[in-house]
Amino acid sequence: MRIAAIAFSACGAVLMDRLMALTTQGHEVDGYITVRHAEGTAFEPFDSVYEITSRLFHRTDALLFIGACGIAVRSIAPLIKSKLSDPAVVVCDETGRFAISLLSGHAGGANGLTEQVAGLIGAVPVITTASDSHAILGDAQQPRNLVLGIGCRRGTPAETIERAATILLWDQQIPLARVCEVATIDVKRNEEGLLGFTKAHKLPLRFYSAEELKKVDGEFMSSEMVLKTVGVDNVCERAATLCGGTGKLILRKTAKDGVTVAVFEREINHE
């Protein structure tokens, strides 16, 4: 993700320094600080939070405000259009006690970013979207037993995979928090975007050869183009099924922005 972090005080600048470590998790982070507190920092100064927010809103994947929620809400309010196009917005209080997913929790990836920020600074993640908050609390109706099969074009960035996966899952009311593994074909072993996506969500990534995928029993959507490209007619459905084991395919191949996704639900042993 391309993240713009915005702070309003010396205390906020100190916390923003710590949040620069998000770069080690595959993000690009730029810091902005009010003019009166910019001296002695490496961050870009700004005069008006409304001007800086307006300038950055559609140029970044996420805005990370370090300050009061009220400031963030008033700054982004005139710019909000759609959950499919708005960036993620996360707010941290200046002391680093809480990280709050404010906007685009699912489609924009704010929920995942909130968890990353909270883990980095030892904050409490505040996520209010019903499905994800239930999953975080360990709700018995939200078991973590889904395998996500993914196919993608060569060179697809992590943020594209993140956005496509969250949107496609959300359309089916499937929370990303229920996913326990990701599976794909072995020719994607060095795809930085796929590796970055799974690393960001701390998900195991399993690779299978075309020969292994061909042997998977079942009826799968077939693509001649995929067959010519990687040697098997379908990657996401076959990979999810092979990795899943016993259970059923609950989301067949769906595509967005060059990313294909399928979901396999593993059976739960209640013994």
Image (tube, grey):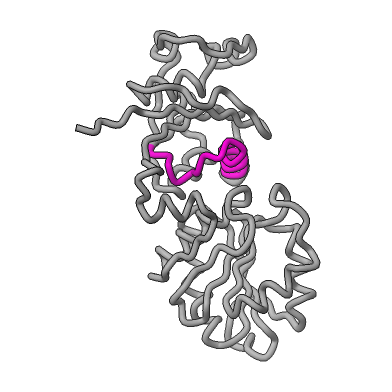
Residue at 73% in and 75% down = 74
User: Left or right: where does residue 206 sit relative to residue 10?
Assistant: left
Residue most extreme to the left = 271
Q: Quadrant of residue 75?
A: bottom right
- How many marks do you count on the picture? 0
Picture coordinates of residue 95, whole percent (x, y): 47, 82
Residue 86: x and y in percent read: 71, 55
Q: Is residue 172 magenta?
A: yes
Left or right: where 77 falls relative to 243:
right
Task: State which region is magenta.
Answer: 161-180
Task: Decide whether the magenta segment is chiefly helix, strand or loop.
Answer: helix
Image spot of residue 17 (x, y percent): 50, 75
What residue is at 57 percent from the left and 57 percent from the top?
Answer: 110
Q: Does residue 13 sit above or below 21 in this rendering?
A: below
Q: Is residue 88 above or below residue 77?
A: above
73 in magenta: no
